[in-house]
Amino acid sequence: MDCIFCKIANKQMGALLHEDDQVVAFDDMTPQAPHHVLVIPKRHIATINDTTTADETLLGHMIAVAKNIAQQRSLDADGYRLVFNCNHQGGQAVYHIHLHFLAGRQMHWPPG
């Protein structure tokens, strides 16, 4: 499989901001906000539709890691956005689930 996020998770490319036994986090290569971090599982899961109830703890852990990054960067008080995109119409470009952490500017609703 030629998945760029699997390569990042396996430390074949890119610099990591966070790593533990389940996930890694790194700065997005095409940031959409002053702070744009991706949190991904080390295990390849193509889309949110491919998760199961067994992945609920993993998904919660991804959110907790993003919250910790917000605290470490002192962005938690001003606020941030967390987003999962799913499939083409949901805006997913890389088919390895990833949680977007966006901060450092005013977010608008509804998103585009």
Image: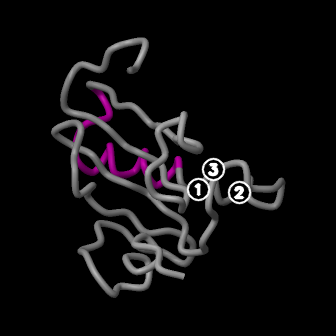
Range covered by the magenta-colored residues: 63-77
Asked if marks 2 and 3 touch (Cβ < 8 Å), the reply is: yes
Assess disc 2: are there few (<14), some (14-19) or many (≥20) residues with their C-alpha within 10 Å of its C-alpha. Answer: few
Q: Amino acid at mark 2?
A: Thr
Q: Which residue is mark 1?
A: 61
Whether residue 5 is situated above or below residue 93 in the rendered picture: below
- Looking at the rendered image, the quarter that the N terminus falls into is bottom right
Query: Is residue 13 found left or right of 56 in the rendered image?
Result: left
Alpha-carbon span between mark 2 and mark 1: 6 Å
From the image, tell me which residue sits under label 3. 60
The amino acid at mark 3 is: Gly
Left or right of 62? Residue 24 is left
Q: CA distance from mark 1 to mark 3?
A: 4 Å
Q: Closest to the observer: 4 or 22?
A: 4
Name the secondary structure under disc 3.
helix
Where residue 27 appears, as percent x and y from the top left, is 25, 58
Residue 26's x, y, as percent?
Answer: 31, 63
Residue marked by disc 2: 57
Q: Is residue 40 above or below residue 100?
A: below
Please check the rendered image and state whether residue 97 is part of the magenta-colored stretch, yes or no.
no
Which is the main secondary structure of the residues drawn in magenta?
Answer: helix
Packing grade of label 3 (10 A; few <14, some 14-19, many >=20) is few
